[in-house]
Amino acid sequence: MTTNDPSHPKVNLVCKGTILEALHLDKRSVNLGRISRSSPEVTKTIVITRGDAGPLKPKLLPRDDLHVKVALKEIEAGEKYALEVTMKPPFPSDSLRTKVQIETGVAEDPTVIIPVYAAVTPRVAARPNRIVVPTRADANWKQAVRLKWDVPEPHKIVSASVTDPSIVARVTGSENSHEVVVALASAEMPTAGNFVLTIVTDDAKMPEIKVPITIGRKRSRPGIPRNVKGAKIDNTRGRAHTPDAKAPAARVKGVAAQPKGAVRPKPAKSAGG
């Protein structure tokens, strides 16, 4: 806080207080962690205890999330409860973000919201999931891309292609260990831009995987810019000049340049002079 007192122009104020809660949670959220698609159901439990008001009368509010089942179990009436959160297959595509709402039975804080998180391993993922072609790439540059499936049955890469003809993609590897190698079609650096590598698989549920490709712009050669042969660009004036050009005659602000040999007129005397 600033004041008009010269000896104390700034003053720091510290406020302290106690936040009262209807109930206490041993964890503020339920994190189910990273779940493999081949995993069975996953369950996490948090403990709810009586807070700073009266006895608890908790009740779960209705939910429409089909991936998560929630149960509230009494440990000690009015004092302690266990909230069980279970996620069962089939799991969602990539992640889960939902919430559980509980009526506390305490008038001062009637409803509590508990976030629930989970990350589901994708069915198939490209490694790396993005390709960046270096600015100084040459004919020897290449990048291998592998696919990682999170399913028990094996799958293969059928083909691969890139939307830019200056980049080529070929499928290599053994029968059970395919990969895609991306390389430049020639020694010349391709045009900067954003393109896509498309990998075709024999997986009916994930027949195509797309990997973005970014090509950086060529770096300009350092030096003094020129617009005509032998003439440099004067960046301060915005015009070209040659090294041997004579500088223009000096000018005095408010007085026009005089021809060579001309006599400059004397300034008129002031009325008071």
Image (spheres, grey):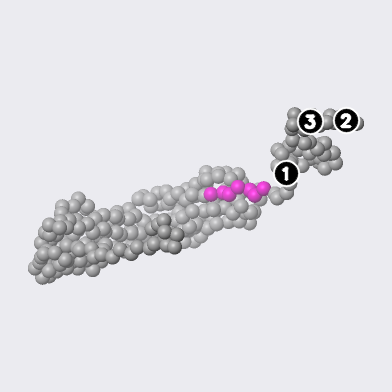
| Residue 5 makes an appearance in the image | yes
**Camera-side residue of 95 and 270:** 270
Q: Which residue is mark 2?
A: 263
Tell me which numbered mark, 3 or 2, is placed earlier along the sequence.
2
Callouts 3 and 2 close, C-beta under 8 Å:
no
Q: Is residue 25 left or right of residue 185?
A: left
Q: Amino acid at mark 3?
A: Lys
In percent of width and height, residue 127 lies at 46, 58
Q: Amino acid at mark 1?
A: Pro
- Secondary structure beneath disc 3? loop
Quarter of image, res 153: bottom left
Q: Residue furthest front?
A: 272
Q: Which residue is mark 1?
A: 225
Q: Residues within 10 Å of mark 1 (few under 14, many from 20)?
A: few
Looking at the rendering, in which quadrant would you find the C terminus? top right
Q: How many angstroms separate mark 2 from mark 1 (CA)?
A: 42 Å
Q: Is residue 102 left or right of residue 188?
A: left
In percent of width and height, residue 27 lies at 25, 66
Q: Residue at x 58, y 56 (%)?
A: 142
**In the depicted structure, whether residue 227 falls above or below residue 3:** above
Q: Which residue is mark 3?
A: 269
Callouts 1 and 3 close, C-beta under 8 Å:
no
Identify the magenta region.
Answer: 214-220
Q: Amino acid at mark 2?
A: Val
